[in-house]
Image (cartoon, rainbow, N blue to C red):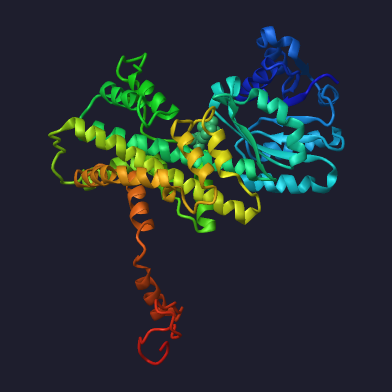
Amino acid sequence: AQAEIGLIGLGVMGSNLALNIAEKGNTIAVFNRTAARTREFYEEAGDLKGQVVPCETIEEFVAAIRPPRPIIIMIQAGAAVDQQMDLLRPHLEANDIMIDAGNANFRDTMRRFDALKDSGLTFIGMGVSGGEEGARHGPSIMVGGTEESWKRVEKVLTSIAAKYNGDPCVAWLGENGAGHFVKTIHNGIEYADMQMIAEIYGILRDGLKMSAAEIGAVFGEWNRGRLESYLIEITEKVLAAADPITGKPMVDMILDKAGQKGTGKWSAIEAQNMGVPATGIEAAVAARSISAVKGEREAAEKILGLPDVPALQIADRAAFVKDLENALLAGKIGAYAQGFAVMSAASKEFGWNLPMPTIAKIWRAGCIIRSQFLDEITSAFTKAPDAANLIVTPAFAAMVKETDGALRRVVSTAALHGLPAPALASALGYFDSYRRARGTANVIQAQRDFFGAHGFDRVDGADSHHGPWGSGLNG
Ligand code: 6PG
């Protein structure tokens, strides 16, 4: 057995990951459900053929890998993964490791991990981010499983991961579902980032009546400032691209109906399960859902019309664009603060001991949300690993104070001119609620006590826990 590792599933992501592994000097055995694809992949491997062992049967594949065998499964998330594991399992030996590298729901990962517990085999749930390019040249990799199984794969994964100033963007984050949970929240944050960018685009397009190319130039400018990130960079590029068929801006020819495969929704659901607000992610998921009902929106515009508000008039366009930049930064702070708060709650809930500074670190390169900003989060959490929330760490508290005025102006301007900005508005609502020591839930508690005798705590700590609502029922 000469292969260091095996990989099943030679789709785009699997092929690219396999080539990346081979290119870094590791020998990899590969297997695909259809042998024709395996042969084709081997040909595509070109110069890297010497590092690839193409296998047409499972027996041959398993025999080609050095025990204990790490086997990456890179196929569509869901039931197909269980089926593949069932097919593989009878051929494996003690300590072999099945690695699911797809976008699995971490609850499935926990179940798969538990199912193998006493079998001698083990399971790694591994989040891989960075799309096709990342898989090929350096993704960010979030590993969940036993520490022992991590040690077996650490070297090869370190060799293929993206590097940020030389630091590999891969880490073992904890047992069982930890890696896939963190990847899910990565995607939830990705949804929020993308939605806030789209909202700013909408304000520029429908408020300032700017063309796609003009808006692209604004994002290009921002990518040289504090918002520097992969998502801003590609936004500039997509806004600059022309449709090969009509010659019009490509974005103007794309239907405003977004798809979603589940990770954003799972992030919001898990946040709700644990009682942690993740309003930026929720708003982003809801916005995709509203986008999907295009026909309903068309009908509604006919019935309701657009809001009867004055058109946006901006005297100082440069100042307004600066406000938009700062508003986006503030919104981003809100979404990341929430994402990290969800992970911190999950860490306790599932006993993972998730290392927050490490998570921020391995997101600095390779993944879709990679950015300069994540380096700032890394240093904030390195200095204060137990901070209750990112926005109360000194550096981020200062950033919130510096940018929330712009967020407030942008959200109110958008509202006054009927331009939807639900994710940006959610960040403002979050900041305004989180930073206010005396909120308004005393009224909620009084109402709950009134209609259901639910009781309340008093500000003076005194003993009466019911209000004088009458009929002697609650008093
Ligand atoms: C990544 C991406 C990648 C993908 C997801 C999200 O980190 O490389 O998040 O995993 O784009 O499938 O997809 P949806 O937008 O389709 O839910």
**Residue 435's image quarter?**
bottom left
With respect to residue 299, does 162 lie above or below?
A: above
Closer to us: 153 or 57: 153
With respect to residue 122, does 28 lie above or below?
above
- x and y, in percent, of residue 203 in the image: 26, 36
Residue 166 left/right relative to 471: right
Instruction: Examine the image and state in which quarter residue 98 appears.
Output: top right
Q: Residue at x 28, y 45 (%)?
A: 300
Quarter assignment of residue 103:
top right
Give the residue drawn at x 72%, y 45%.
112
* Residue 322, placed above or below residue 284: above
Say which of 123 and 322 sits in front.
322
Quarter of the picture holding the N terminus: top right
Q: Residue at x 66, y 27 (%)?
A: 158
Task: Work out whether residue 166 or residue 98 is closer to the camera in this orientation and state it.
Answer: 166
Work out whether residue 387 can be spotted: yes
- The answer, for residue 43, to whether it is visible in the render is no
Q: Residue at x 78, y 35 (%)?
A: 97
313 to the left or right of 67? left
Residue 305 pos. (x, y %):
21, 44
